[in-house]
Image (cartoon, grey):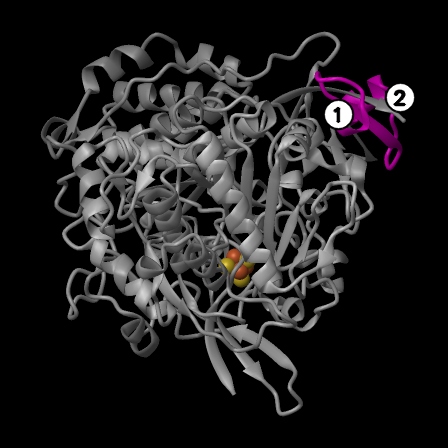
Amino acid sequence: MTTKSTCSYCGVGCGVLVHREKSGQLRVEGDPAHPGSKGMLCSKGMNLHYTVMDQTDRLLYPQMRYSRSMPLERVSWNDALDRAAAVFRSLITKYGPDSVGFYASGQCLTEEYYVINKLVKGFLGTNNVDTNSRLCMSSAVVGYKQALGEDSVPCSYDDIDLADTLLVAGANPAWCHPIIFRRVEARKASFPDFKLIVVDPRRTQTAAMADLHLQIKPGTDSTLYHAIARGLIDRGLIDRDFIENHTEGFAAFDAQVHKRTLKEAAQLCGISPDDLRWTIEYIGRSKGFMSMWAMGLNQSVVGVNKNLSLLNLSLITGQIGRPGAGPLSLTGQPNAMGGRETGGMANLLPAHRDLNNPQHRQEVADFWKVESLSAKPGYAATEMFDALRDGRMKAVWIVTTNPMVSLPNSRAVEEALQNARFVVVQDISGRSDTVAYADLVLPAAMWGEKAGTMTNSERRISYLNKFAEPPGEARPDADIIIDFARRMGFGEAFAYQNVAEIYDEHVRLTKGTRIDISGLSHARLQSEGTFQWPVPTPDSMGTKRLFADSQFYTPSRKAQIKTVPDENGSEPTTPDFPLVLTTGRIRDQWHTMTRTGKVAKLNNHIPKPFLEIHPKDAEERGIAENDPVVVTGRRGERSVDTVRVNAKLTKDIRRGVVFLPMHWGKLLGQTNARANNLTQSLIDPVSKEPDFKFSAVQVARA
Ligand code: SF4
């Protein structure tokens, strides 16, 4: 038997065919009919079936404890959810609705996001619902909103096949979005004039393929994009008609970028003036200019500014809304976009409505048949843990994510979970470090054990079929939330018979909005395949490219060229902590390894955590290849503030910069390899995205 699904790792969203052999064994292959991935899967996707078949780590039944000094003990679902309801009800009565919150995940299906968001904002009366997408795309979202008027990725993967210049910034798609990168490689092979420019302090696999690698100093991204803009303007390589007719804000931007010469900018960025000039030429002379970026831009205290300064290059050249052109942000998680569509973030309402807009709040309140929604923005991810730490929040319900490994500043996260009165962890795996801090553990169904939808990086919605039964007493996440909602007394509003009814309700809320999917039902997704939103009518085939008419979603219908400062506001280095730590992914692991870490084939690629360091920086510290090293941050010397791994010496990283993979946590026997022991709590003031890519550290031989 063969079932269609979508890979549940990264935002590329590749189509998967799952075969169940007569023996009961599962096997996966790429779905050749999937328009985005065309039958391709990367190493993680090709091994997905092992994560379903190996159930040794699965959480099989609810577990609870009444005191932190007691062990977790098996309980029934009734006891588990009755206690959860009693605790939440009591805390809300005593301390108000803002004393509780939900922290969910870009791994959740759209239907799961929808019911969590509806429960929290519509019925618990707080906006304290945020997700780990905050750690991933929120700076890109704010950038799109400010520049284009809406959280809208303009182009499609198909545009890669038509572009002649691609600038990849702060991303390593060769490892982290491999199937998109296969399309880049194919374009490069078939079109010799294609130019690939990569901006990254590390010479990654992607950078190794580039025609130009701009190995900038961390934090100088906006300086670079301003300099490129200046060069384009000075050489007459901008689209003045487009700027005049379809944008606003060019004059101020023009003045800003002329404050520095190209030579000064090149020096600040640590690149050669010649490379900067070639970049300007490649972009300015191209018929189709695309940009791609990921966490190197987003995960920054100035992440929004970095996004806006990059988007400006598309706007001043008029390279948007046409084939082979435009900005294409690379979503980290498989359904970060679907989550935003349901409004599942602390500052959002369904269908990209704005929590700060009273009319939007009333529309949603009327739809959900409640009197009103709270106008107070909820806590964003890191703020939620700050609130737990200082007592403003008393309880948190964590769904499908592992903040003890993935949030910045692990010590602060640990203190937050220890200080919380009540922690619920709803997850698939006992390998999550966060389970150890739970008062109540709820076993969830994983990929393939439930059905629902996801939206990938190119706005493509796909339906994920169920092909396996959850083990033990594990249940789909939406079922668990709905059951809890009923026990809280909201049964009438959560009387869904199946996930299709949840999806239909979500769809009705999109009607008339810019992400209108009124023409898309579960039935249509199952029979006709995937669609890119908007899909406003039943005969619409979806929308490959936005802004083809150069009419943007701002009030004036013109794109906004935003003038932003180019300074970096990260934690400064000091003589005691002179190195910049940056963190990121490796090819064959996903996030905190709760799934990929149990697949032997994937562990073989890079079996152990490591610190990447330039040979000269290593030599100064008496460190040789594979030596054990201790990395210390500025927050102290407890084990939770240091990392101990072996050194990997490489000239692929800039001097003064070191790199740690983000994946390893305590349960994998690598307590001291947790990269977030060293990251700090700074966040972008607008997007609230953490500054994972710039922490001041020192390295010594252990
Ligand atoms: Fe899965 Fe991403 Fe690999 Fe595609 S590129 S198979 S979505 S991990």
Magenta segment range?
615-640
The vertical placement of 453 against 320, above or below, is below
Q: Give percent across and percent down for residue 599.
A: 72, 63
Where residue 195 appears, as percent x and y from the top left, is 42, 43
- Give the crowd class for mark 2: few <14, some 14-19, many >=20 residues within 10 Å: few
In the picture of the structure, the residue carrying the numbered disc 1 is 641
Q: Indicate the amino acid at tag 2.
A: Gly
- Image quadrant for the C terminus? top right
Please give the residue where the numbered disc 2 appears in the rendered image: 622
Element on which disc 2 rests: loop
Three-letter code for the amino acid on which mark 1 is drawn = Asp
- Residue name at image x 24 percent, y 25 percent: 561
Query: In the image, is 74 to the left or to the right of 273?
Result: right
Instruction: Name the residue nearer the viewer: 561 or 376.
Output: 376
> Secondary structure beneath disc 1?
helix
Q: Position of residue 684 (x, y in %)?
A: 45, 24
Q: Residue at x 30, y 28 (%)?
A: 312
Q: Would you say residue 373 is visible in this rendering?
A: yes
